[in-house]
Image (cartoon, helix red, strand yellow):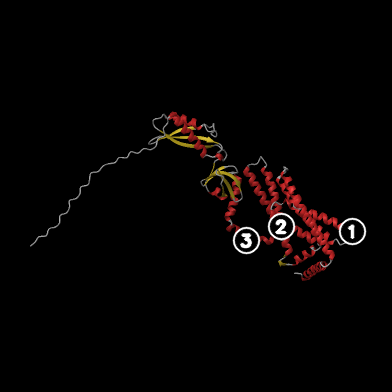
Amino acid sequence: MNLGKIDATFERFNDITSTVYESLFVPDTWIQVAIVLSALLVGFVVRRWVHPKIMRSLDHIDWPQRVETAIARVADLIMQVIAVVILVMVSQVSLMDPPPFSSSILLLGSNLLVAWIVISALVQIINNPAARRTVTLVGWAIAALAIMGVLDETSAALDDFGINLGDFRMSALTLIKGVLSLFILVYLAAFIASVLERKVQKARSISPSSKVLIGKVLRIVLVTFAILIGITTAGVDLSLLAVLSGAIGLGIGFGLQKVVSNLFSGMLLLMDRSIKPGDIIEVEGTFGWVDYMGARYTSIVTRDNKSFLIPNEDFITQKVVNWSHGNTLIRVEVCFGVDYAHNPHEIKAMAEKAASLPERICKDPAPVCHLANFGDSSMDFKLRFWIKDAEKGVTNMRGAVMLALWDAFQENGINIPFPRRDVTILETKEAVKPAPKKKAQTVED
């Protein structure tokens, strides 16, 4: 550390503190402070009156949601804008000869408020409230130090606090610059990736799985470059991170192998197109359609509107039934039996006609019924029909066809047999009771 620079910096801050302390006892200072507080109070009152009207006007204007949100956030700065206008107007009074009071604090307050307004307006593109407030406070703090003329001294003081790591010097200033650079660059990379993903999603010539894959690759590449550029901007030599990156990679290999496995499994699913958003699939007894494919999991939405988050690795290592892979045509089967007293040819024609009644049944290929087996108490048939919209339900269509069969059987007097068992009870002869034992007689001498 350079103790001479640190002492000079502290002396500079002590001078500023002494000047501020001495000015507190000057009436001119209290007059300017009162003017600044009055300007803020007037701005607050105006904001309370104008802001609700602006919000009601936005409700009647059909603008994009992002534009309306940005305007609503900018409307929150009405208080600062009114205060700046008042301070600038009052500061003109100090130009009179002789001036009734000084305007140094008025100009300082107006400059700080203008910096806050400009920075707050620029960060409206950030959707995350926490990130937006953080950027606003950090940017305004830097601007305030520059307005007060102590930014260079503050930077020098922060740079003097540090340690040397070989040829690299790690100081407080380097750390702050690195964190700010990483935050800004990573957020910009994520913002650009989101914009590009929306553009890709609108492309009609790209399949749904390819859209998801392109979006994920773009996000990973942009964020990786942002991190590397941010570290380099902070002055960190990337060669120093070789050992650290190797240790991190080893830790990821052992500790996060499931996460990495799911990540590469997801990319493999997107590349081979075995599963894509919108497919109707069945995995481990879960039936539904693919709603979202992420880097770690795939979201399956069932008919009862439950979302199952299934790890991507399960789609690679386990059996998956894709009902719409390549073709959305799905065959459904209904089994039934009728009494031997009926003509099987008539039953076959009747069943095929009944299966063609529901609207969702495909006409081509047409429903078909086959005699499958001569059972113990019935002739067993298999009725097969095709649908194209399995996402609307399969069980409900099977039930609709069975109801149509029931109506047709009731109309034509067709009996559905049920198993019959004959039980014969055999009577047994009454068991012969054993004769009672005689008591032993004693012989008297």
Residue at image position (68%, 62%) is 240
Q: Quadrant of the C terminus?
A: bottom left
Question: How far apart, in angstroms, are the residues tagged by discs 3 and 2?
Answer: 32 Å
The image quadrant that residue 362 belongs to is top right
Query: Which circle's residue, 2 or 1, is located before the other in the chain?
Result: 1
| Residue to which mark 1 is pinned | 95
Q: Identity of the amino acid at label 3?
A: Ala
- In depth, the one of 31 and 291 nearer the eye is 31
Q: Secondary structure at mark 1?
A: helix
Q: Which mark is residue 134?
A: 2
Q: Nearer the viewer, residue 145 or 247?
A: 145
Label 3 neighbourhood size at 10 Å, few (<14), some (14-19), many (20+)? few
Is there CB contact under 8 Å for labels 3 and 2?
A: no
Asked whether the viewer can see residue 169, the reply is no
Q: Position of residue 230 (x, y in %)?
A: 71, 57
Label 2 – label 1 distance at C-alpha: 38 Å
Indicate the position of residue 386 as horizontal and vertical percent values: 53, 35
Sequence-first tag of 3 and 1:
1
Asked if one can make out residue 377 in the rendered structure from this viewpoint, the answer is yes
